[in-house]
Amino acid sequence: IAEDKKLITFKYFFTRKLIFIRHSDAIVLFPGGFGTMDEGYEAITLMQTGKSQLMPLVLVDKPGGTYWKTWDRNIREHLLRDKLISPVDLNLYQITDNADEAVKIVSRFYRNFDSTRFIKELFVIRLKNAPSLSALAALNEDFADIIVEGKIQIVKPTPDEIEDNDRLDLARIGFNFNRRDYGRVRQLIDVLNGL
């Protein structure tokens, strides 16, 4: 039997998980055991703490299934109720029992949004299309709680991005982010995708 050249075998589980998160543009999980829970919690935690790029995390159940709804109820009744997570952290994942809806969730996430990057204190969000001035004013009003100082502004590629030739063709907004409320950044991405 010929071996698939795309197959990668990892000696260490940690390395497998690191590559899984680092090289994914979206994560879709189906009902599973401890490994599924481990990878799901790892993905949420890394996004919640800003240690990985925000991406769609879609939890897909069988039609009419309750696996992920039960999981979500546990999250809300224990972690959220006991203030071990913030209400905005619930924005880091979405649940569906419809495969077509899962595809839409992933596609919608990248409608306008491309990626983020910190350049010193400036949090840069790269977009296919920049927001209008009126949309920018609304963003500053609606997301003032995550801005340390200044405002969300349209910015040009920074010298660091130019040096790295990092997505120079894209529009950008930038602001001084509090580096804490990534669930709110997820909401900001949804708004930017709806513009």
Image (cartoon, grey):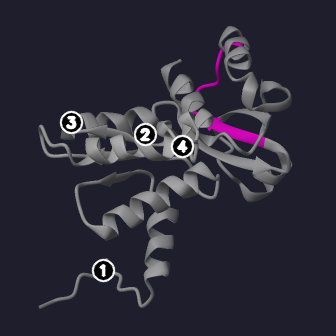
Q: Which mark is residue 76?
A: 2
CA separation in Å, label 2 and label 4: 9 Å
Give the labeled residue for mark 4.
82
Q: What amino acid is found at the position of numbered circle 1 in the picture?
A: Leu
* Residue at the image position 56 percent from the left and 57 percent from the top: 46
Residue position for label 1? 7
Query: Disc 4 vs disc 1: Cβ atoms closer than 8 Å?
Result: no
> Residue at label 3?
100
Three-letter code for the amino acid on which mark 3 is drawn: Asp
Which x, y percent locates residue 44? 49, 53
Distance CA(mark 4)–CA(mark 1): 43 Å
Q: What stretch is highlighted in magenta?
A: 123-133
**Dot 3, how many residues are within 10 Å of its Cα: few (below 14), some (14-19), or many (20+)?**
few
Badge 1 density bin: few <14, some 14–19, many ≥20, Cα 10 Å: few
Q: What's the residue at 56%, 25% (across, down)?
A: 192
Q: Earlier in the sequence, mark 3 or mark 2?
A: 2
One can see residue 159 in this view: yes
Report if residue 56 is visible in the image: no
Judge depth for marks 2 and 4 and give the one in front: 4
Q: What type is the residue that disc 2 sits on?
A: Arg
Which label sits in the foreground, 1 or 3?
3
Nearer to us: label 2 or label 1? 2
- How far, Cα to Cα, is label 3 from label 4? 34 Å
Residue 126: within the magenta?
yes
- Please state which amino acid type lies under the numbered disc 4: Asp
Q: Which of marks 3 and 4 is nearer the N terminus?
A: 4
Q: Which of marks 4 and 1 is in front?
A: 4
In the displayed structure, would residue 96 be above or below residue 119?
above
